[in-house]
């Protein structure tokens, strides 16, 4: 073995502890795919769901105990920001697996591949949360996204699912090309010596005036590529169709876990890598955030599908969270975005659990299906009302505190116009959320009450309880968030 190979192997072994959760997920998911079908026959495929939950619990423990550090030639960094957003991804994925059990059983679509793809995608998200180099950012995004393309088209006997998966794949490939081209421009602007975010920040700040256009173009292309991954306007065109065509648990998955990972990458890339050239991206990102708030909320008003309504709502919430990325204080911005994303995951997962209950066999997810839910299932209707009002940010629910901390930070950093726009569009969101509440409590019920599975019951109960507990402790949430992962 050559000296170079020995040195490379030594470095890999030395740094492996930083990515223990990701390696665990990849190994387990690979074993599930290979001999997985030997353990359970076709009628026992549902047993993979609880097994996946155990795997996710072990992953959460590994994330918690992994020590801080930087390795792999400074391409991956484990710190408070990484650990915090990795935990969000694991929690959102656990909710997705719980949501999947009842729906896949009713559709007779339980397969080991479904859960293995979720785990592979989660491993990409965990890499993305800690990626500290533009190359590792790109490869992490691809590992995360390729699995989701397949999951969106999972119901291959449905034209809408296949169409949504194909549309998402084509636009995703196009955005990845833009991202790579932007990375290559920045690599050239930095003298062809580095793509590490910390080094790039210093190199770009010292770039000669003649290279300013190159830097500006590269930063904008990276911004476009990453904005696509969080479905920010005007790079959102894939989201409504993908959300509607995908299996509902995967819709909930796309709205939470990948967004958490992509926002962590946003905070690290633009907060650490491009901080020295902030004048090149603050204004474009401000326009993207504002446009996401406006279009996301306005388009949601006219929707008749609950999944499309939640898709446009998700676009609007991304606009709010980008206020934290725009913050001149990376630590405070990361904490505010993390807290908002945690609250959003809880509310969104609970809302999708109710949608899955009303879907039955997945044939409909119309807002009209909520008619009379307050009479047919008062507890379920109450939980859904809590989720929707909290998503709208109506005080004193916990969603209000998530928005309050973000908006307060934005005002302190001088983004007054954007904050006013956020407040006005939040009022618009209250209109369409209350429209669903109106269907539940002021319309006559139609059809019979369907039995709820154990999974949706558990999720609705847990998430509603968490929202109410968070409401009680709202004023202390930001301080709590700051102590958990950023000590």
Image (cartoon, rainbow, N blue to C red):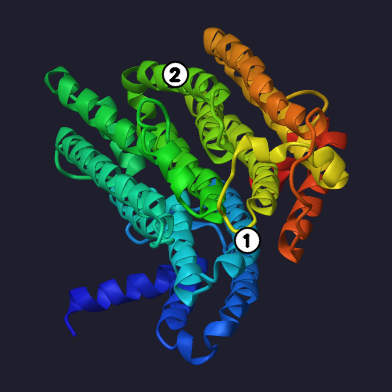
**Residue found 17% across the figure and 32% down from its top:** 189
- The quarter in which the N terminus is drawn is bottom left
Q: In this view, does 472 lie above or below 172?
A: above
Q: Is residue 39 left or right of residue 400?
A: left
- Pointer 1: what residue? 94
Q: How crowded is mark 1: few (under 14 residues within 10 Å), some or many (20 or more)?
A: many
Considering every residue shown, the one lying at the far left of the view is: 210
Q: Residues within 10 Å of mark 2 (few under 14, many from 20)?
A: some
Q: Is residue 145 above or below residue 374?
A: below
Percent coordinates x, y for residue 273 in the rendering: 36, 36
Considering every residue shown, the one lying at the far bottom of the view is: 38
Q: In which quarter of the image is residue 238?
A: top left
**Residue found 19% across the figure and 77% down from its top:** 3
**Residue found 65% across the figure and 64% down from its top:** 102
Q: Is mark 2 on a helix, strand or loop?
A: helix
Q: In this view, does 48 lie above or below 372?
A: below
Contact between marks 1 and 2 (CB within 8 A): the answer is no
Q: Is mark 1 on a helix, strand or loop?
A: helix
Give the mark nearer the N terminus: 1 vs 2: 1
Q: In which quarter of the image is residue 10?
A: bottom left
**Residue found 60% across the figure and 30% down from its top:** 332
Label drawn at residue 14: none
In this view, the residue in front, 78 or 470, is 470
Percent coordinates x, y for residue 278 in the rendering: 37, 22
Distance between the alpha carbons at the discs numbered 1 and 2 = 31 Å
Q: In this view, does 390 lie to the left or right of 130?
A: right
Q: In this view, does 274 lie to the left or right of 472?
A: left
- Pointer 2: what residue? 291
In this view, the residue in front, 278 or 363, is 363
Percent coordinates x, y for residue 46 in the rendering: 60, 76
Can see residue 482? Answer: no
């Amino acid at each position: 073995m050559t000296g170079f190979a020995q040195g490379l192997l030594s470095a890999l072994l030395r740094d492996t502890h930083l990515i223990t959760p990701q390696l665990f997920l990849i190994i387990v998911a690979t074993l599930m795919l290979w001999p997985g079908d030997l353990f359970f026959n076709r009628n026992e495929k549902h047993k993979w769901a609880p097994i996946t939950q155990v795997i996710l619990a072990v992953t959460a423990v590994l994330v918690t105990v992994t020590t801080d550090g930087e390795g792999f030639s400074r391409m991956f960094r484990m710190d408070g920001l990484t650990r915090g957003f990795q935990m969000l991804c694991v929690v959102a994925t656990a909710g997705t697996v719980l949501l999947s059990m009842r729906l896949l059983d009713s559709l007779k679509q339980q397969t080991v591949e479904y859960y293995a793809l979720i785990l592979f995608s989660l491993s990409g998200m965990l890499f993305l949360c800690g990626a500290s180099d533009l190359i590792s950012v790109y490869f992490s995004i691809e590992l995360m996204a390729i699995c989701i393309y397949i999951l969106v088209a999972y119901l291959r006997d449905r034209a809408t699912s296949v169409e949504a998966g194909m549309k998402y794949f084509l636009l995703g490939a196009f955005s990845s090309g833009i991202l790579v081209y932007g990375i290559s421009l920045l690599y050239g602007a930095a003298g062809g010596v580095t793509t590490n975010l910390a080094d790039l920040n210093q190199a770009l700040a010292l770039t000669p005036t003649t290279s300013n256009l190159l830097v500006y173009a590269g930063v904008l292309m990276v911004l476009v590529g990453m904005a696509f991954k969080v479905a920010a306007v005007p790079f959102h065109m894939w989201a409504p169709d993908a959300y509607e065509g995908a299996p509902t648990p995967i819709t909930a998955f796309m709205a939470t876990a990948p967004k958490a990972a992509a926002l962590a990458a946003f905070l690290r890339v633009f907060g650490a890598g491009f901080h020295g050239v902030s004048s090149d991206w603050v204004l474009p990102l401000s326009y993207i955030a504002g446009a996401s708030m406006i279009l996301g909320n306005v388009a949601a008003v006219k929707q008749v599908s609950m999944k499309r309504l939640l898709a446009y709502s998700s676009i609007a919430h991304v606009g709010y969270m980008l206020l934290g990325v725009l913050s001149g204080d990376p630590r405070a911005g990361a904490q505010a975005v993390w807290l908002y994303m945690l609250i959003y995951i809880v509310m969104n997962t609970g809302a999708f659990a109710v949608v899955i209950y009303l879907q039955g066999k997945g044939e409909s997810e119309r807002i009209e299906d909520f008619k009379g839910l307050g009479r047919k299932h008062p507890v379920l209707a109450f939980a859904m009302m809590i989720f929707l009002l909290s998503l709208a940010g109506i005080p004193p629910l916990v969603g209000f505190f998530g928005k309050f901390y973000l908006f307060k930070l934005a005002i302190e950093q001088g983004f007054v116009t954007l904050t006013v726009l956020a407040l006005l569009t939040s009022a618009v969101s209250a209109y369409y959320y209350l429209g669903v509440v109106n269907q539940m409590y002021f319309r006559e019920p139609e059809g019979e009450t369907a039995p709820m599975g154990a999974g949706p019951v558990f999720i609705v109960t847990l998430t509603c309880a968490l929202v109410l507990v968070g409401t009680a402790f709202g004023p202390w949430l930001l301080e709590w968030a700051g102590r958990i992962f950023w000590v």
